[in-house]
Image (cartoon, rainbow, N blue to C red):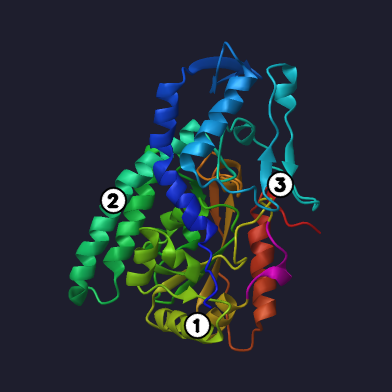
Amino acid sequence: PTPHLKRPRMITALRAALVLPLVVAAISSSQRVNVHTATRSGTKWSSPIVQQHGQNMRRNLRRSLSKALATTKNKQPGSWQISDRSSTSSSSNSRLVKSSSAIATPPTNAAVQGANLKVFGYDVTKFGVYFMAHALVYGILWYLSLIKWAVLSFIDKDHHNMDRSSLLWATRTLKSTGCMPIIEGWENLPKEHGGTMEDDGKPLMIVANHASWMDVPVIRQITKRCKFLAKKDLGLVPILGPSLRWGDHPLVDRSDKRSTVKSFRQGVDWLKKGVSLVTFPEGTRSVDGRFSSAEALKGGAFKMAIYSGARVVPVSIAGTYDIMPKSALLPLRPSDGRIRLKIHAPIETHKGMSEEELAAETHKTISSGLPPSQQPLP
């Protein structure tokens, strides 16, 4: 018999995000929840608590949400979870507990501790719902634009207009929610991508660390004309998936050697055409926000750069893990200047360079632009 194919957690989480506002509204109307403003460390923050029943009513609210969704999953292994906060002073000392015995660095910000809902085991805050509302509105416009350029693909064979649609979505969503990054190093990027360096027609392989879902719209701010080297699973994500598939972005299925070879050739072809590629060589988001070791980086991107003669541009992304760690379904709070993106000087490649040598140099450069909390462990 055909084995049951499990739906990717990412797709399930995104579908939960679509129904979250309706569920929260229904629960809020059936149960009287007062918004109480508390003061913590001199900073005001708001969280829904019930004045009459305190902690018990809060638990009931979470249970009602779980029943309404009807598909709430068990907590994921290795994911961060928030211990219940009491109404006493111990609430400020609430700990982040990992469900596995492995040691890792918990998020250092108060936003995770302030998360007030759990959806499919992920943390959600009021700001996350606010962010999602903007992302969905702009996402509908993005999808309509994709359909338009899919129909008009005969006048845009490289599908760059589709890529511009994704850039417009990312920029509008980040600006409207206060999550735009602070960018340094424009002098290391060609004018084609919005930098100040003179264009010489040589393609770029833009390589960055990967700690959060927010890395994708953030790095999009420095990639005007490019393709993403991404996992094949992302092709199943609503709106993003069609954008990647219809835009001929190289999608890698590491479990299939043929797919790996095909995506390698596709990526090299784009580089030879002068179209830059963007990739996260760690292969997945960091659990604790720290950059992986040089040995853990995937070599495909570096092999493409050496084979095609493309420059490698290391990029350090800092602060996205504080905004949206792997345990969060949506961003937990606005950036407020926390998200920073540093563009380093390009690394020239040549035929005699090995993948390991290029990976080590790129890793060292990216690490130099990260804060101590994101530095790779020795």
Identify the magenta region.
291-298
Q: Secondary structure at mark 2?
A: helix
Pointer 2 with pointer 1, Cβ within 8 A:
no
Foreground label between 3 and 1: 1
Disc with the residue nearer the chain's start (3 vs 1): 1
Give the distance between the C-alpha atoms of the residues marked 3 and 1, in whole angstroms: 36 Å
Q: Nearer the viewer, mark 3 or mark 2?
A: 2
**Crowding at mark 3 (Cα within 10 Å: few <14, some 14-19, many 20+):** some
Q: Residues within 10 Å of mark 1 (few under 14, many from 20)?
A: some
Q: Point out residue 274 in the picture as x, y percentages from the top left corner.
A: 39, 78
Q: Amino acid at mark 3?
A: Ser
Q: Which residue is mark 3?
A: 373
Q: Secondary structure at mark 3?
A: helix
Please tell me whether mark 1 sits on a helix, a strand or a loop. helix
Q: Is residue 251 left or right of residue 164?
A: right
Q: Which residue is mark 1?
A: 259
Residue at horizontal 66%, vertical 73%?
359
**Location of residue 44 with respect to 26 vertically, above or below:** above
* Contact between labelled residues 1 and 3, with CB atoms less than 8 Å apart: no
- Specify the quadrant that holds the C terminus: bottom right
- The numbered dot on residue 140 is 2
Percent x, y for residue 47? 54, 23
